[in-house]
Image: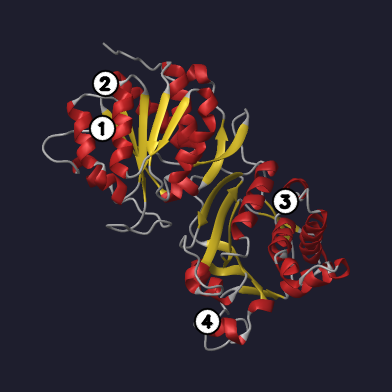
Amino acid sequence: MSDKSKPVKNVVIRFAGDSGDGMQLMGDRFTAATAMVGNDLGTFPDYPAEIRAPAGSLAGVSAFQIQFSSQDIFTPGDRVDVLVVMNPAALKMHINDLRPGGTLIANKSNFQPKNLKQAGYDSDPLTDGSLSDYKVLDIEITKLVSKAVEDMGLPIKTVERTKNLFALGLTFWMYGRPMETTIKWLEMKFKKRPELVEANIRALKAGYNFGDISEVFSNSYTVAPAPLAKGTYRNITGNYALGLGLLTAAEKSGLPLFFGGYPITPASDILHQLSLYRNFGVRTFQAEDEIASIGASIGAAFAGSLAVTASSGPGIALKSEAMGLAVITELPLVILNIQRAGPSTGLPTKTEQADLFQALFGRNSESPIPVISAISPSDCFYTAYEACRVALKYMTPIIVLSDAYLASGSEPWLLPNLTDLEKIEVKFT
């Protein structure tokens, strides 16, 4: 235990564990607490395959990375300062990204022979000396949360599910994050299950108190607030920002918004989001395939709507003929390409930025289309708005390039003054 708090400018933390260990929840709650402190931040959720892999396997590892700083930052970071792992598979997948001298926090309770073998370890890395380049904190997290709630009589599986809150509380203590926002969130999420509220809050506080009283930590750390411009901020993902940009463009242009799409990761969130605005004149259409979705959007553009479609990878390839139709008919159509990794069907949950040439030249004959791209999750708002402006002004389809990293990543977004946005001209004849 130490009363010392060491000031640092920026920190990169990665939470990693099995897809059922609540890593995305940990990241989301740490992000919310960090926003309350006033740090600039960038996040990147890293999901496993949508078809869930066996528990404890390398393919089933889920991770969430956040960089927070007292200065302006533009990415979720590169080398990791603190790596929190819940099992051997998570360690195997992510240890190479931990910087030399970085801190490794491991749930020792899960480093059993069976789990080690499943992850491909011949010996326990926590004890065999292979992690000597790092500061290793092997903590019996599962046992400690069991002790924290032992008088509640909860099932073992329910107790084990709270281990992510223990680790979250520990990182809260390490970097001076407030627990109040997470406690309020737990009370709201589990309001019909008061026993779960209490169990999770106990686990959260147990982790925080462990950091406060344990002798394994020489000090905590302080990251001062970033010098952000005055105004109202909210945390926003790239896909959500794209949706808000489209809604704003529809309002500024005076045109009804039509979105034709087909579910495909990582673009599906945009369809889900816009479908919630049907009471505000937004029409969404989930088509039977990619070609039908862009065909419907072209029809909506012909009928006078602000028309949008979105896809990724193979879906963009399927839409190429219809894109040429939009070119020769001179119809305003916004095409969102949320890029994912790999050729053909590709890797739905992984990111890549390799579709530029496809966007520029991926159509037969001469069918030029403007192409613009976003540089950050919050910039997706302005990129979507600009795409709508260009499409309507010049009566042309336009492609917006984003990717899985921007789509799922988040950062603080300063709510804009809508009067400052460039006017959208509509010249239907």
From where the camera sits, is residue 72 visible? no
Which residue is tagged 3? Answer: 177
Dividing the picture into quarters, in which one does residue 129 lie? bottom right
Which residue is tagged 2? Answer: 394
Residue positioned 63% across, 60% down in the render: 22
Give the mark, 4 or 3, whose residue is nearer the N terminus.
Answer: 4
Compare residues 331 and 290 and report the one nearer the observer: 290
Give the mark, 4 or 2, whose residue is nearer the N terminus.
Answer: 4
Tag 1: residue type?
Answer: Pro
Compare residues 407 and 97 and report the one nearer the observer: 407
As measured in the structure, the alpha-carbon distance from the residue carrying label 1 to the one carrying label 2 is 10 Å
- Describe residue 294's horizontal placement relative to residue 9 as left or right: left
Give the mark, 3 or 2, whose residue is nearer the N terminus.
Answer: 3
Which residue is tagged 4? Answer: 118
As measured in the structure, the alpha-carbon distance from the residue carrying label 4 to the one carrying label 2 is 57 Å
The disc at residue 370 is: 1
Q: Are marks 4 and 2 in contact (CB under 8 Å)?
A: no
Nearer to us of marks 4 and 3 is 4
* Residue neighbourhood size for the residue with mark 3, other residues' Cα within 10 Å, grouped as few (<14), some (14–19), many (≥20): many
From where the camera sits, is residue 211 visible? yes
Q: For mark 3, give the secondary structure.
A: loop
Tag 4: residue type?
Answer: Gln
